[in-house]
Image (cartoon, helix red, strand yellow):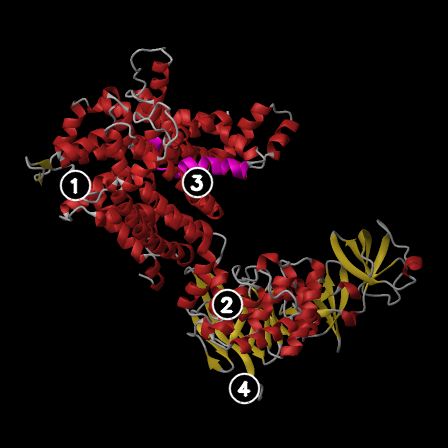
Amino acid sequence: MKRHDIYTLPILIWLSLFFTIPLSITVIMSFMSSTPYGGVTLPFTVGNYVEIMKGRILAILWRTIRISALSTLITLGLSLPVSFFMATSKWKNLLLMATIIPFWTNFIIRIFAWIFLLGNNGMLNNILIQLGIVKNPITFLYNSWAVVVVIVYTYLPYMILPIYSAMEKFDFSMIDAAMDLGATKIRAIFKVMFPSIKGGITAGILFVFIPALGSYAIPELVGGRDSVMLGNLIAWEITTARNWPYATALSNILFVSTALALFLYLKIQGSDGK
Amino acid sequence: MTVIVLIFLYAPIMFLVIFSFNSSVTGANWMGFTLKWYGELFLRSPDIWEGFKNSLIVAVFSSLTATFIGTMAAIGIHWYKPSFRRYINFNIYAPLIIPDILMGVSMLMLFVSMRIRLSLFTIYLAHTTFSLSYVVLVVLARLENFDSSLLEAAMDLGASEFQTVRRVIIPMALPGIIASFLLSFTLSIDDFIITFFVAGPGSTTLPLRIFSMIRFGLSPVVNALSTILVGGAILLTLLGRKFLKYILAGEG
Amino acid sequence: MDKDGAVYSVELENVTKIFDESTVAMKNVSLKVKKGEFFSILGPSGCGKTTTLRIIGGFETPNEGTVRIDGRRVNNLPPNRRPVNMVFQNYALFPHLSVFENIAFPLRLKKMTESEIREKVEYMVELVKLKGQERKFPRQLSGGQKQRVALARALVNEPRVLLLDEPLSSLDAKLRQYMLMELDRIHDEVGITFIYVTHDQAEAMSVSDEIAVMNNGVIEQVGTPPEIYESPANTFVAGFIGETNFFVGKVVDVSSEYLKVETRFGILTCYKDKEAKIGDTVEFMIRPEKVYVTKNYPPQNMNFLRGKVDQLIYLGSHTKYYIMVENTLIRSIKQHTRYWMDESTISWDDEVYVWWNPDDSYLIKVTGG
């Protein structure tokens, strides 16, 4: 230890106690067995993982990845043109604020807004019934599509902000230069701008994809039977079944999926030297 | 495109806000202007206020703790090349990139194995933990502008290390420190999933309370509450405008 | 007190500084800086001059050797307890403090009264000519003004020694010249020792009482500017300070004052600054301003070369000639008089004579043969 390590000592202790150790406990516990009253017991076993591998869990894992990937793609598709417009706009600060406000708005409230809008007793159904277009409310929510829409809605600012930050630093005269040298505008954007905003894009993808993988509240509130995600399963095992070894094994599978996504990210980042 | 996205972002919230002034009980049918849901919220919703109070307590203490520890760490990392640099980095970056639910589960497992009773205190521990990484990154983003010659200058002019921290480093880093406090405060107030796992009976925070309310269906009181929270978000955005660039730099 | 009675402000004795167990920044450096001197440490980047300054300031600790300030050993004294202050290369002004507060910073640390602080800061502001700028913040100042604030802040503590680390390097040429004169004036006014680190030989030459030339962590020579320019200790110093023409050859004849040296240009005569005997290999130099270029046959009928004008650069006050002689460029500088325009008939590609007075050459090195 050096004398100046005093500055980093508190964080070292805090994060060891409340991050590294808890993660380790989670890993250890996943190799233990549960007792009938919600406790855990030795000996070590891989039973939890075997159980997961042969159950319907694989289907849920696959669905979790599918929903997360789709939401991320849609978010990216919306964010690219919006960030571009923002970065080149005269009112960029105003637009930035406009994307920050929903970002600061309570997460659960943002989900609630959709229930209010599209729920069975929601605004849209009420309007449709009053106009006599339908007799009984249409179930817009409680399916995978609703989950995707709400994930896109809640995480959109997480994608826009890093991409916007990267684009804002980009020197747009380089596009003019590329066009001056004979590139079409589309080509100029792809060849000149994309490489320099790649960092922002990958950051945005991570900021959306990883929390989406761990979704719990969104599928819980706007999803249905066909859209149970890994997060719901983990929460159910913990709060209702109280089977901690099984729940931690599920968490570790989520962890591995995340690590895998991250590994791919680092590989992409590494491949262009940054 | 941008307009469509902005409508997409704002329309749901706008409807929430508009219908918080609607006198219909079913909520989704306009029956005339009223403030009765606000009356209901302010006068007859002790559960919501209890949750609000809990959220506030946790947010204040966790963001103060995180800002203090995180700022110290950022100073150490930026200027003093600490030992265990890789391990520290892992602990700072990993919480940012693993899903929150994992942090919630693992913290719960810690408390369970240590037989720590779930309470506001465990929520405080959890919130401080996830805020720390953001604080370090935001303060580091601010410190990036300053090289070691400023510390050397302070020492050269007679300042002790403590005086250098108090008279030079803290004032210079202040915008970043304030930004990180604002960010941790908001993250704490906003957090649902981690709190969901580490909250115990009697320590329900506002997001948990709203969650259980909307599970039971629509309630105009939640609309009224939403309006107030959206107002808070706007206020925070305006207040935090000056510090935004550090927050963005820390996140991006 | 030294043997000869002079008091040294800063003394380094056999100081060695090694970074990362491999990079040797200073090798056995010994220096003595007299009280009140304007002392420069001059050398190319990476030569160890900044490390030397930082060792005096206390920012680095030497691996070996002794550092003394005013005769007191300070090896283990941290910067905040040394009677020296530093002007940093990038000024290192505190961005959150005004000009006044930047200068007052060390005084506030000493818990001086408000009126004392005011008095001292005002004196400093006067000294560095910053009147009226006291309430501005560093970001509102020009480079030159920042420089003045840094100077005032370093001087307000009344240090025994002021250390300056390439303080003018980020200013443009004209401002640099002016600030250099200002530095000289301030040095005269405060009367303390200045140690000035630079890579710019013109800067060092113009203001220093003494210069130490450093290279590769070693002090090559310490001397007054004329000593360093006229009698460099070795080829490195000769080449680093100003432009010069080098010649190498074997001594073929020795007289009481001159040597005749067989060089690849033929036999040249040089002044015998050092003892040499026939057969020795010698290296000597001649500075460009002492080299004549004429179309006419040189009057001295010896010690001349024939060549072709390769480059000719008119610089207002003087003209630089580069004459190609046997695939080597010989440099010459001619100062202009008002008749120069009429006299000058030399132009590109002209065949010319290059010559100099043997008394003007300097014998750098003799290797026994």
CA distance for labels 4 and 3: 73 Å
Q: Which mark is in front, 4 or 3?
A: 3
Residue B29 occupies which quadrant of the picture? top left
Q: Amino acid at mark 1?
A: Ile
Q: Secondary structure at mark 1?
A: helix
Residue C330 as seen in the image, left or right of residue C35: right
CA distance for labels 2 and 3: 51 Å
Q: Amino acid at mark 2?
A: Arg
Nearest the eye: C30 or B4: B4
Q: Chain of mark 3?
A: B
Nearest the eye: A89 or A213: A89
Q: Secondary structure at mark 3?
A: helix
Instruction: State which region is magenta.
Output: A92-111
Labels 4 and 2 touching (C-beta < 8 A): no
Q: Which mark is in front, 4 or 1?
A: 1
Magenta stretch encompasses residue C206 = no
Residue at numbered disc 2? C54
Q: Chain of mark 2?
A: C
Q: Amino acid at mark 4?
A: Asp
Q: Which mark is in front, 2 or 3?
A: 3
Labels 4 and 1 touching (C-beta < 8 A): no
Q: Which mark is in front, 2 or 1?
A: 1
Residue at numbered disc 4? C2
Q: Which mark is residue A28?
A: 1
Q: Which mark is in front, 3 or 1?
A: 3
Q: Are marks 2 and 3 on the same chain?
A: no
Q: Chain of mark 4?
A: C
Q: Amino acid at mark 3?
A: Ile
CA distance for labels 2 and 1: 52 Å
Q: Pinpoint residue A196: horizontal percent, then vertical percent.
A: 51, 35
Q: Pinpoint residue A47: horizontal percent, then vertical percent.
A: 12, 31
